Image (tube, rainbow, N blue to C red):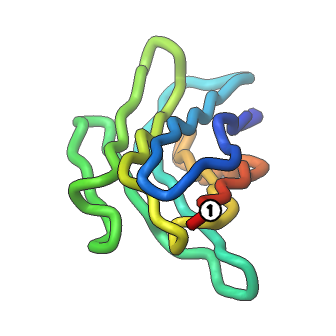
Amino acid sequence: VQLQASGGGLVQAGGSLRLSCAASGSISSIDAMAWYRQAPGKQRRFVAAITSGDTTNYTDSVKGRFTISRDNAKNTVYLQMNSLKAEDTAVYYCNVYIDLQGYWGQGTLVTVSS
């Protein structure tokens, strides 16, 4: 199983980006899918998650700005990020539970210039 994250980049404050994370390989079922981020010099922290039943959860700092979604046919989770702030700058990692085991993507860098 592999997770391929993409969509990061450099954006001005107030702008938007859409991250994607696609799972591939031998997959029977995908449960929860989530995004975490790690800012320079800080620990990796939870950003958002979506269950197999499409229940979503967000950390307070991104509520109303970020939207997590999934496409089960494509084994892909997305993170739409709007109204980006400088403090959103981080490496974003997807985390996906596949066949009861958690997997991490390789990370994609988001840089927000103020």
Q: Residue furthest top?
A: 73
The percent position of residue 22, horizontal first and vertical second, equals 63, 28
The percent position of residue 52, horizontal first and vertical second, equals 32, 36
> From what the image shows, is residue 42 above or below residue 86?
below
Q: Quadrant of residue 38?
A: bottom right
The secondary element bearing badge 1 is classed as strand
Q: Residue at x 72, y 54 (%)?
A: 109
> From what the image shows, is residue 113 above or below residue 97?
below
Left or right position of 43 against 1: left
> Looking at the rendering, in which quadrant would you find the C terminus?
bottom right
Q: Residue at x 69, y 52 (%)?
A: 104
Q: Residues within 10 Å of mark 1 (few under 14, many from 20)?
A: some
Q: Quadrant of residue 24?
A: top right
> From what the image shows, is residue 43 above or below residue 5?
below
> Looking at the rendering, in which quadrant would you find the N terminus?
top right
Residue 101 at least partly seen: no
Could you tell me the amino acid type at mark 1?
Ser
Residue bearing mark 1: 113
Depth order, front residue of 74/52: 74
Residue 72 at least partly seen: yes
The percent position of residue 19, horizontal first and vertical second, equals 56, 38
Q: Residue at x 41, y 39 (%)?
A: 80
The percent position of residue 87, horizontal first and vertical second, equals 52, 74
Q: Residue at x 39, y 57 (%)?
A: 48
